[in-house]
Amino acid sequence: MQDAFVLHIRPYRESSQLVEIYSRQEGRVSILVRGSRSKRSNLKGILQPFTLLNIAWGGKGQLKFLRGVEAQTHALPLPGDKLYLGLYLNELLYRLLEHLTPYPELFQCYQDTLLALAKGQAYEPILRVFELELLTALGYGIDFEFDAQSQQPIAQECFYRLVAEQGFVLAEQGDKDAFWGGHIQALAQRDFSTPAQAQTAKRFCRTLINERLGNKPLISRQLFIQQKRKV
């Protein structure tokens, strides 16, 4: 049995489901759950997002089959906007993580992020920390301290552009997409305490995440925007 969370569920044939989970030891796993949509199944109330589960599966191929599951906790309460933010986290993991690749530190960060959201903490800093951890897990080990080309320390008074496969490099004068050195230094310290620092962190994370997502937009992001417009 492994610690795991449900990321995504979709119907399969008449009575089964394909469930994408994120496990502590093996990362993202696709599991076929036979008969889970039938009226007699007791799995409907267990296989739910935002619930820490113990799951066992088998199978030698990429698609596994469920052997057993039990809930370790009740589903975390994520009312209102928090639900869409939780769905955003799940969609990022579902879309970006390599199949059957462990990310144990990211798993703990994801669990901590859900708990923080459930406690009603300010969500923007929480999301930025998670996004930065996700980018690191995906191989974006961006150096916030040194210019990627000159290897000189990032200077507070200078401006830098972000090169995805390299890092920050000194920007040409007038580059409207450049990042101010002082904000990069704050980003290195996970300091989002001012509106400008928070906006810089959001722009940095979104730039790299969107690059990995490609042309397919995030459904959870669209739903969140629609919900905010209704309020």
Image (cartoon, rainbow, N blue to C red):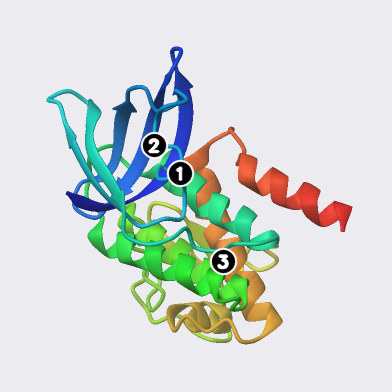
Q: Report the amino acid beneath label 1.
A: Gly
Q: Report the amino acid beneath label 3.
A: Ala
Rendering coords of residue 190 (x, y %): 47, 80
- CA gap, disc 2 to disc 1? 7 Å
Q: Is residue 23 above or below residue 202?
A: above
Q: Earlier in the sequence, mark 3 or mark 1?
A: 1
- CA gap, disc 3 to disc 2? 58 Å
Rendering coords of residue 231 (x, y %): 87, 59
Q: Quadrant of residue 28?
A: top left
* 120 and 75: which is toward the camera: 75
Q: Quadrant of residue 130?
A: bottom left
Q: How would you rate the neighbour count of disc 3 (Cα within 10 Å): few for under 14, some for 14-19, many for 20 or more?
A: some
| 3 vs 1, front mark | 1
Query: What residue does disc 2 label?
Result: 42
Rendering coords of residue 36 (x, y %): 39, 28
Query: What residue does disc 3 label?
Result: 171
Q: How many marks?
A: 3
Q: Look at the numbered discs 3 and 1 and tell me whether their residues touch, using CB distance below 8 Å.
A: no
Locate residue 29 relative to residue 112 in the image: left or right.
Answer: left
Q: Residue at x 40, y 45 (%)?
A: 46
- CA gap, disc 3 to disc 1? 53 Å
Rendering coords of residue 170 (x, y %): 50, 69
State the mark number for residue 141: none
Q: How would you rate the neighbour count of disc 1 (Cα within 10 Å): few for under 14, some for 14-19, many for 20 or more?
A: few
Element marked by disc 1: loop
| 3 vs 2, front mark | 2
Query: What residue does disc 1 label?
Result: 45
